[in-house]
Image: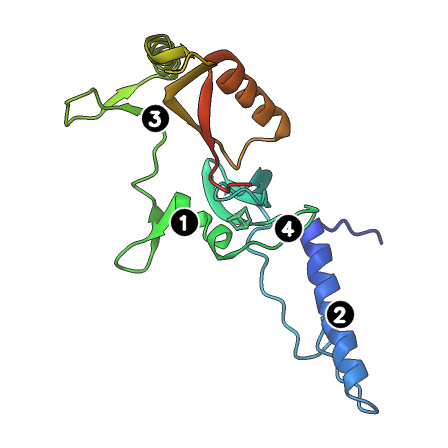
Amino acid sequence: MKKDISRRDFLKYLGAGAAGTALFEGAGATPVLAGENSPDFEAGPFKLKKTKETSSGCSYCGCGCSTIVYSEGDKVVFIEGDPDSPINEGTLCPKGSALTDVYTIVDKKKGRILNPGRLTQVQYRAPGSSQWEIKDWDWAFSEIAKRVKKTRDEHFEEKDEKGVTVNRCKAICQMGSANINNEEDYLVNKLMRGSLGVIDLDHCARL
Ligand code: SF4
């Protein structure tokens, strides 16, 4: 009878089979099976079976490791490395392995609760103010554009003190992101260098 298995089930069976084979070969004349055929093998319930899988990326550095985010409704329940990724092949470094903690944290009773520090809205603190205000994205985008244009116009230098043409703006710097791809990086560079004259560009991974 045909039985549908998920990729996760497949990997689990593969791992169990490989363990069984290794022990069988290492045990010489006395076969020892530790896989799913072993009388001692007891697979627990697969806790992520009813969750939704969404492909995503680790947000921490420029290595570009891919992840699978498991969610139930609007709640993230687990994040792990994506075994289909040619970059990380299912692995994550200690930082990436803690990605789920962006969404939930461990409380004093050692239970998981939603991370109260996770930002989900635009927050704005006006110059000189000690208060944060919640703003919408339309307001934020037009405000950012307005301020970037004003700063660039006020500080753009066509020539330096020796009369050499420089066409630069030293009042803005640009910080790259590990979560954007080559094409997006190209556009960011065109905007920053070509349109605004920004010469201070950096990146969280310094690649
Ligand atoms: S922080 Fe770790 S898991 Fe995340 S992209 Fe970098 S190497 Fe990969």
Is there CB contact under 8 Å for labels 1 and 4?
no
What residue is pinned by disc 3?
Answer: 121
Q: Nearer the viewer, mark 1 or mark 4?
A: 4
Question: Residue 176 placed where, x, y %?
Answer: 48, 31
- Tag on residue 66? none
What residue is pinned by disc 1?
Answer: 101
Secondary structure beneath dot 3 equals: loop
Describe residue 108's horizontal placement relative to residue 206 as left or right.
Answer: left
Graded by Cα atoms within 10 Å as few (under 14), some (14 to 19) or many (20 or more), the crowding at tag 1 reads: some
Q: Amino acid at mark 1?
A: Asp
Of labels 3 and 2, earlier in sequence is: 2
Label 3 to label 2, Cα distance in Å?
Answer: 47 Å
Label 1 to label 4, Cα distance in Å?
Answer: 20 Å
Q: Amino acid at mark 2?
A: Ala
Is there CB contact under 8 Å for labels 4 and 2?
no
Is there CB contact under 8 Å for labels 3 and 4?
no
- Tag on residue 18? 2
What residue is pinned by disc 4?
Answer: 88
Describe residue 75's horizontal placement relative to residue 121 as left or right.
Answer: right
Residue at the outermost bottom position = 29
Q: Amino acid at mark 4?
A: Asn
Label 3 to label 4, Cα distance in Å?
Answer: 31 Å
